[in-house]
Amino acid sequence: MTRSAIQAPEALSRIKGLVDPAMRAAVAALSDETMRLIAGYQLGWNDKDGRASDAGGKAIRPALAVLSAEAVTGVPDGGIAPAVAVELVHNFSLLHDDVMDRDVERRHRPTGWVVFGEGQAILAGNAMLTRAVEVLMETGESGLRSLPCLLAATQVLISGQSRDLSLEGRETVTLDEVIDMEGGKTAALLACSSSIGALAAGGDGAVVKALETFGWELGIAFQLVDDVLGVIGDPAKTGKSSSSDVRAGKRSSVVVAALSNGGTAGEQLAELLAKGAPSVEEDVTLATKLVVDSGAIEWANTEADARLQKAVDQLGSLGLQESSAADLAAVATYVVNRDR
């Protein structure tokens, strides 16, 4: 029921090599030493004492930003600053989300607030968000063209996290409400990432819009897969505890789909979760089994594949640089077919 991971496309490592020096320069420009330390830790560059490490993420958003610029102009240059900006915003949100969700592990090591304290982690997130805006403003006209995209996506992202918090305390939640919330938390920034490079590079409005739609559909697919992994993912690969969303009592799309299906498994799951988040291992195991038995995992995987196809379909008639369109499709396929 978990997906078989496919090999990462070459475009990811190529673009990481282009973006990484600019990312490091942007973080180095933070005026406060503690903020630089925490930002570097969050990005996987260093440990809590500042010693070099390699615990970074997949850098999907920077890759999409650069590829969207390449798709319009054939060269990556116009996408570098937007790539840095979206990755800074992404990690701002992760720092804050981990505090709010009380997540204690990310990428196989303690989360920022666990290591540095809640206040410092929140401040570091603020510093990264502010730096993202500065990075775009420093690029002049192209940055001013793309800044509204970043700011609008950030507002939607914040709204999505707010709705996530409010849904946690609700007795009943619909699947449509969850998908809408997850669109804000995940799809909005992926939509921006997939179009901001083209916007900065002066791409045609129709092209920018289609790339935005590509990123939105990819974002929904990405989150559906993430929700699957939050129930049945291998902790050795995901860097989180087994059945992490079940333990946390999260109303993810997969959990709500299980509760909504009207079958015996869904009814039993509802009875179990009515007591609150499972606190003993036996209940965690049972809740996980009930989600699987409900058919929610199969539903999420099928829906993710459908959303991926919708995303890739956007690339067909835009007159994009052929190699860049192929790279965008390859990155999208990779991030949906993952096991971590």
Image: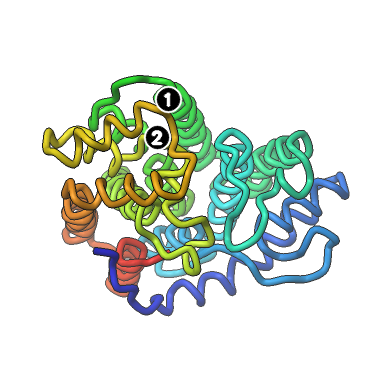
For residue 263, side relative to residue 49 (left or right): left
Give the residue displayed 63% in from the left and 37% down from the top.
Answer: 99
- Residue bearing mark 2: 184
For residue 301, side relative to residue 17 (left or right): left
Residue type (three-letter) at the residue carrying disc 2: Gly
* Count of numbered tags: 2
Q: Position of residue 125 (x, y in %)?
A: 68, 40
Residue in front for this viewpoint, 84 or 157? 157
Residue 338 bears which disc, if any? none
- Is residue 233 visible to us here? yes
Q: Position of residue 52 (x, y in %)?
A: 78, 71
Give the residue displayed 55% in from the left and 47% down from the top.
Answer: 90
Give the residue displayed 29% in from the left and 21% down from the top.
Answer: 172
Distance, label 1 to label 2, CA atoms, is 9 Å
Q: Position of residue 267 (x, y in %)?
A: 19, 33
Q: Is residue 12 above or below residue 68?
A: below
- Residue bearing mark 1: 163
Q: Earlier in the sequence, mark 1 or mark 2?
A: 1
